[in-house]
């Protein structure tokens, strides 16, 4: 990652904008793969699924990278966003819990192609130790501290059952990990300075169920009105 000069300080970017930057980066990558070299804010906003005013405001936090009447240089903007996020270097990642979900995460090509390197897979089950998953040998969970120290790991992924998640997080924090992606269906308590992102598939499905129910109720209401007309 290109270091900032002493005169530069980290930009104060809103969390909502930070959450959208990876979406813009993915949209730019898709445009670049399709042979697009320049794009307007409208084109990029459409590819990212946001309105153009929001996109322009988000990008204004990064600086001025567009040219009036021309638009954005796709490769240059992609690099600037990747640099802002921190993806111009490979971040070492450790995954704890090599069940079905942990294996799927280890095999997910998007992790390796987007600035991350899975350096260790850990599991408490001795029967799994030595097993190769995506070319990486599963190691005992007790190796966590050594791996974090040797590979300078700051990002950990928890894919364990809910009951084990907090104790795993505690060990991660004690070992020096400061960012955790939690797939376990539980809320983690961590000290100040440790960032946790939670991915709960059941909650996402419940939200979709809500929308499906609303659509069904709306269709039923329309049908009822038709019958009484």
Image: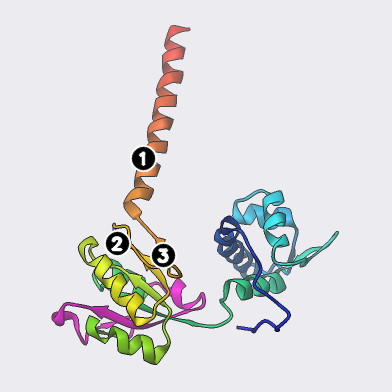
For label 1, the SS is: helix
Element at label 2: loop
| Nearer mark to the viewer, of 1 and 2 | 2
Does the residue at mark 2 contact the one at mark 3 (Cβ under 8 Å)? no
Most distant residue in the bottom direction: 150
Outermost residue, top side = 229
Give the residue drawn at x 25%, y 70%: 167
Q: Give the range drawn in magenta.
A: 108-136
165 lies left or right of 31: left
The label on residue 191 is none
Q: Does dot 3 land on a helix, a strand or a loop? A: strand
Observer-nearest of 171 and 102? 171
- Residue depicted at x 62% and y 72%: 84
Give the side of residue 58 with respect to residue 154, left or right.
Answer: right
Residue 65 sits above or below residue 223 on the image: below
Please state the horizontal and vertical placement of residue 162, each as a whole percent of the image.
24, 61
Label 2 vs label 3, nearer the camera: 3
51 lies above or below 188: above
Q: In this view, does 28 lie to the left or right of 177?
A: right
Query: Which mark, residue 184?
Result: 2
């Amino acid at each position: 990652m290109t270091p900032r000069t002493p005169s530069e300080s980290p930009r104060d970017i809103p969390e909502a904008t930070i959450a959208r930057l990876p979406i813009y980066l993915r949209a730019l990558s898709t445009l670049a793969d399709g042979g697009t070299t320049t794009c307007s804010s409208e084109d990029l906003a459409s590819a990212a699924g946001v309105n153009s005013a929001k996109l322009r405001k988000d990008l204004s936090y990064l600086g001025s990278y567009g040219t009036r009447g021309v638009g954005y240089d796709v490769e240059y903007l992609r690099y600037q966003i990747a640099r802002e996020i921190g993806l111009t270097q490979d971040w070492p990642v450790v995954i704890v819990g090599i069940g079905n979900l942990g294996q799927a995460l280890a095999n997910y090509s998007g992790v390796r192609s987007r600035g991350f390197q899975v350096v260790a897979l850990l599991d408490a089950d001795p029967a799994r130790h030595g097993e190769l998953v995506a070319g990486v040998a599963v190691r005992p969970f007790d190796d966590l501290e050594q791996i974090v120290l040797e590979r300078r790991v700051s990002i950990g992924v928890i894919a364990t059952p809910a009951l084990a998640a907090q104790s795993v997080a505690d060990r991660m924090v004690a070992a020096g990990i400061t960012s955790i992606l939690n797939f376990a269906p539980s809320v983690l308590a961590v000290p100040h300075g440790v960032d946790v992102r939670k991915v709960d598939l059941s909650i996402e499905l419940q939200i979709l169920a809500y929308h499906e129910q609303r659509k069904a109720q709306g269709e039923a209401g329309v049908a009822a009105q038709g019958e009484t007309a």
